[in-house]
Image (cartoon, helix red, strand yellow):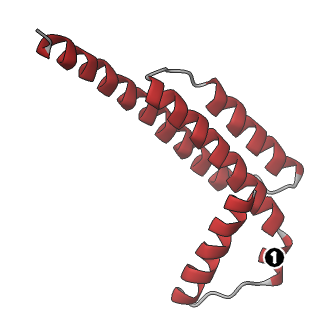
Amino acid sequence: LKRSRTTIEDFVLSYYPYYGLQVTLEFLKHFDIFVWVEAYIYRIDEENEDLARKGEICFDHIEKGLKDIKEFLRTKNLLSLALEEELNKGRQYWISELTVCRKFLVFKKRCVKHASP
């Protein structure tokens, strides 16, 4: 959670002034929700990176993680169609990341195998 909080704080402090935005009470009212969602996204991403390093393909953590996020946001009455579409783009990114990493590792193993005497 600390990492998420720091990321969001850095983003707001860096980019809001650049775009002439101000932190409002409405934003602060939802800050803990932003932090929780960001932390959950970090967790999914870390699991994805662990699988990618191993060359394993498994999408269960992505599906469960996004389902949990959507349900959490739904209970807060904050899940919109636009937000759901953004989460689905993240899902597609993680699936693509695992697929590309898996293919790269298989290719790398073949190259090493053929290069060996």
Residue at the limit of the structure toward the right, as seen here: 75
x, y percent for residue 40: 71, 47
Snapshot quadrant of residue 12 = bottom right
Pick the front one: 106 or 71: 106
The residue tagged with tag 1: helix, strand or loop?
A: helix
Q: Could you tell me if residue 99 is visible in this image?
A: yes
Label 1 crowd (10 A; few <14 / some 14-19 / many >=20): few
Q: Residue at x 81, y 76 (%)?
A: 28
* Count of marks placed on residues: 1
Q: Viewed as shown, does residue 39 lie left or right of 13?
A: right
Q: Position of residue 113 (x, y in %)?
A: 20, 12
- Nearer to me, 8 or 63: 8
The residue identified by callout 1 is: 28
Relative height, residue 85 to residue 67 (above, below):
below
Image coordinates of residue 55 in percent, x first then y, are 43, 23
Which quadrant of the figure contains the C terminus? Answer: top left
Specify the quadrant that holds the N terminus: bottom right
Residue lying furthest front: 117
88 w.r.t. 20: above or below: above
Residue 80 coordinates in the image, percent (x, y): 72, 54
Residue 42 lies left or right of residue 75; in this view the side is left
**Relative height, residue 19 to residue 77 (above, below):** below
What residue type is disc 1 on? Leu
Q: Is residue 104 left or right of residue 41?
A: left
Quadrant of residue 21 in the image? bottom right
Q: Is residue 80 visible?
A: no
The furthest residue to the top: 117
Examine the image and state in which quarter residue 30 appears. Answer: bottom right
Residue depicted at x 53% and y 32%: 50
Which residue lies at the image location 77% right of the left edge and 55% below the top edge?
A: 36
